[in-house]
Image: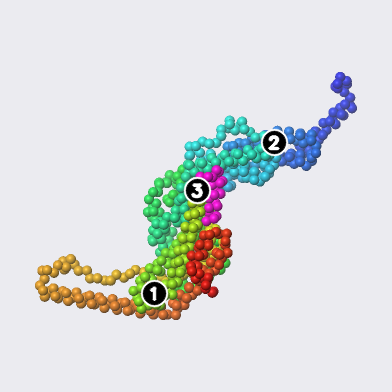
Amino acid sequence: EKVDGAPSTMNHSFIEIQRLSSTISLLHDVIFCARDKIGGELLNTLLNLKMTSLAGDYNKQKLIDRILHKGSETWMIMLTYWLKAGDLEDPCGEFMIVKKRETKKFSGENWNNFFSIRRSHVFKGVVSSSFLEERILTTGKYWNAVHHCEDIASNKVSQETEEISNKILRYSEDPSDIAVQIDQDYKKASSHLLRLMLDHFAVEKSLVTLKRYFLLDQGDFLVQFLDTAEPELTKVLENVSRGRTQHWLSMALQLTDSNSEDIDSAVKKELTSQPLTSQCIRGSFADESLDEVLGVCEGEPRTPTHHPYGQVAGLTGMMSFSLDFQRVLFPTSLLISRRNLSSYKMLFRHIFYTKHIEKRLVGVWFDNQMMKEYQEVRGLLGPTFCLRQRMLHFVQNFLYYMMLEVIDPNWNAMKESIPKQETADDLVNLHDKFLQKTMEDCLLTNAALFKSLAKTLSTCQTFSEQMRRFFMTIGMTGKRRMSRRRVEPACEQFTHNLTSKERQAKKQAKKKATLEEKQERISRYKKQVSVIARELQNSTYSRMIKRHADVFDENLDDLLGKLRTKVSYGSQITNLCIRLDYNGYISKQSF
């Protein structure tokens, strides 16, 4: 060949080859490094080659950039469709996102595992941090959730394929531009999903249902359920009838929720815009006590061990009963996940058991009112009355603290913040913070505090149980005995047709019957006083009361001491300590 009009020589050829040798060498290195690699892994290999072997060689780096620009087109197209529509077309397994093939449907249980990141195919030239990796994964998942819901909600929000094809992302040496686009797509997908959740799936109403029943905001439901189910739930867990308990729970829910909606379609269909209602609630029983669930049960709680009127049962239905939803549908399950529902169940068990103890102590108070007519023994009952009142004061003030100083303020703050949330993640985080703060303020996250509280409540429970059995022992079952009165037939009330002698005889007979009834009542009264006095003067009874009083005061002092050190809990804890230690009574005691 001729070069510049002159014949080509070996020298000229050598010069040309030398000029291209670096390019040929680079291509050889590229082929050698990239063999058996595809997708993001191949792109990362080329990027590694550029950053290590070619540092300082501008021409070679520029060539590698051209190869990366062309080679990443398919990867960038898949990234674009994933970010803007949640579409995943990756037949060769080259993209950073992978879908579990065995997973068919969205649900709260498989949401986090429906898609996952294939770390080996994350292109580091575009995705430079783990934060961006998670943001890309979440964006596409949100679009898939929108697709999953939009047919039901009749609200098409995803972008069309033609529109996306005009917005394909391109590889750039500066990844900040792509990071900005990723953030914009994430916010767009999340805000669309948020609007669907609030406007079409009414998650706020589902949260109201949780507050009404799981946080026991519906007082008449609790009263009606306890009135019917308490005898069954106080049995040992193995002996509790699940069927009867569920029946009583369903009846209480139906009686209290007069405005409930028909949700049969919500139960049958996979997706629906119906919120969770009381008809979705089912009863459940845990296998462990709340102490064991929270891991604070290293040893038995410090409560009185001598029970003269019978040993208190172990784990009962009352201690393990909880509410649950038969099913939480998607996308409501994003907000009310199984983890969050477990927190609600723990709060329910905590409040429910405390309210049960309050009800038992009120029952002891009612039984004590029957003793007031026995003036001869009222002095002996002074320590019992005082201890019962201090226990009732503690339980009622703690319930007031949980319901009105913790749950209601936290709930109202969350409710006011819901309209201000911009993305679905913001809503989920807001709800998580509400649950976390409520759990913390109700002493369910601090093992030491809950252990002291559990011991104090357990002492109240054993005292109420011992007093119930005491009243059974002395023959007073908690119901006032009605005086037996003679009821005369209506025909005998008209005496105007009787002779004077007959009327006098009838009057004498009635007077005699009244005297006999009075003597019988006096005899019964003296006999009852004798039984009560004998039982109260028994050293076993006095030791039992003194032991409960000592342990209760000691446990309450321990609880107050720990509460006072938790200044981070806020002014509510200070108010609770002041009410529980009214007039400084506990502080002045020496234990």
Q: Nearer the viewer, mark 3 or mark 1?
A: 3
Lower sequence index among marks 3 and 1: 3
Tell me the residue that label 1 is attached to. 473
Q: Residues within 10 Å of mark 2 (few under 14, many from 20)?
A: some
Instruction: Compare residues 92 and 155 and report the one nearer the observer.
Output: 155
Q: Residue 26: x percent and y percent?
A: 79, 36
Separation (CA) of disc 2 from disc 3: 43 Å
Q: Residue 463: x percent and y percent?
A: 45, 70
Q: Are marks 3 and 1 in contact (CB under 8 Å)?
A: no
Lower sequence index among marks 2 and 3: 2
Vertical arrangement, residue 499 with respect to residue 48, above or below: below
Vertical arrangement, residue 404 with respect to residue 6, above or below: below
Tell me the residue that label 3 is attached to. 416
Q: Residue 426: x percent and y percent?
A: 56, 46
- Which of the 4 quarters of the picture holds residue 119? top right
- Which of the 4 quarters of the picture holds residue 293? bottom right
Separation (CA) of disc 1 from disc 2: 87 Å
Q: Residues within 10 Å of mark 3 (few under 14, many from 20)?
A: few
| Point 88% across, 21% down: residue | 7
Residue 314 seen in render? no
The segment highlighted magenta reads 418-438
| Point 54% across, 48% down: residue | 428
Location of the N terminus by quadrant is top right
Q: Are marks 2 and 3 in contact (CB under 8 Å)?
A: no
Residue 509 seen in render? yes
Per the rendering, the mark at residue 18 is none
Q: Amino acid at mark 2?
A: Ser
Instruction: Compare residues 302 and 316 and report the one nearer the observer.
Output: 302
Tell me the residue that label 2 is attached to. 172
Separation (CA) of disc 3 from disc 1: 54 Å
| Point 85% across, 28% down: residue | 16
